[in-house]
Image (cartoon, rainbow, N blue to C red):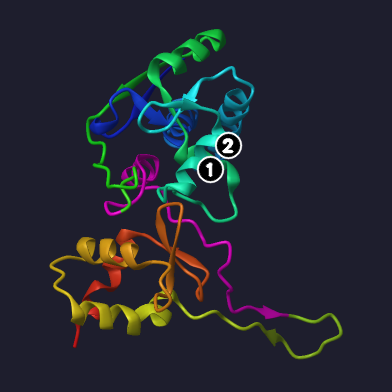
Amino acid sequence: MEYTIGTPEILGNVASLHRVAAAMARTKAMAGGKGFKKPTYDGALRNFTATLIKAARAGQLQVCNQFDSPGNPDELVAIARKEGRLVEIPCDSDLTIAFNVYVNLQQLNAWAATLGRTFSITHDGAPWMDETGWNNVVGVPPDLDYRQELAEPEEVEINEVLEVETKVISGAAPVKRSRKPSWSTTAMPYMKSLFVSGKYRSASMFYEALMLRAGQSDSPFKLVNRELYCTDAGTTVSKSTLGNVWPQIRAQ
């Protein structure tokens, strides 16, 4: 089995464990020639991430930081946190490790050879990196972009609360459950204020500005898996979703 990993050119032959796992998961999700299967991708990404971390902790896979300096996963994460360049994924220690721990292509293939696998690296279309070692300004990782290009149907948010009527067996009147406000309703005052205070020529530029400010005390957003997450609405907001309300944001 052969896998191709997309990484920023500045990294050379080094890739994060997340990108390695994503390359493996994409291949599995496309198997069978029936298009991209998102449930398969999600499950495979989680499993491959855990497999890589387990191999690294056992010393079977030699890992490093983004500068190709070797170490064990937990030490590398601790150092990244101390140096202020940690990319932390809330409530997910495996993903935090995967985003901050890297592997040299030679070491990766030495480990993969025992499993009958081969990896290669491409820099075509890979995003640039900022000073934290990740494309925080550009946006989501390649695996998420890949899903969008395949025009997968949008998932229903797990935390979305729908207004439903429940019939009670006893014959009592239907009960209506409360509905959470939409993300745009919750975040619109903040977004309009930010738009007025800056010069944003496109929804893409504005999305990047929101990402840079995510997590600040006045922002309704935080970053989750490299996307905006509106806490009050309980939903993620992609760049394309923001584009749908861009005219409302610009309206005075």
Circle 1: residue type = Ala
Circle 2: residue type = Asp
Q: Position of residue 174 (x, y in %)?
A: 72, 86
Q: Does residue 140 belong to the magenta stretch? A: yes
Q: Does residue 48 belong to the magenta stretch? A: no
Q: Residue at x 58, y 31 (%)?
A: 53
Q: Position of residue 232 (x, y in %)?
A: 51, 76
Q: Is residue 108 above or below residue 123?
A: above
Q: Residue at x 40, y 82 (%)?
A: 185
Q: Are marks 1 and 2 in contact (CB under 8 Å)?
A: yes
Q: Which residue is mark 1?
A: 78
Packing grade of label 2 (10 A; few <14, some 14-19, many >=20) is some
- What is the spatial separation of the Cα atoms under label 1 and label 2, in whole angstroms? 6 Å
Q: Which residue is mark 2?
A: 74
Q: Position of residue 54 (x, y in %)?
A: 63, 28
Q: Residue at x 19, y 84 (%)?
A: 251
Q: Residue at x 22, y 77 (%)?
A: 195
- To which quarter of the image does residue 198 belong? bottom left
Is residue 44 something that shows in the picture? no
Could you say whether the residue bearing mark 1 is in a helix, strand or loop? helix
Q: Quadrant of the C terminus?
A: bottom left
Residue 175 placement, left or right of 193: right
Which residues make up the magenta segment? 137-166
Q: Is residue 194 above or below residue 112?
A: below
Packing grade of label 1 (10 A; few <14, some 14-19, many >=20) is some
In the image, 217 versus 83, the foreground residue is: 83
Q: Position of residue 17 (x, y in %)?
A: 47, 32
User: Which is the main secondary structure of the residues drawn in magenta?
Assistant: loop
In the image, 206 versus 60, the foreground residue is: 60
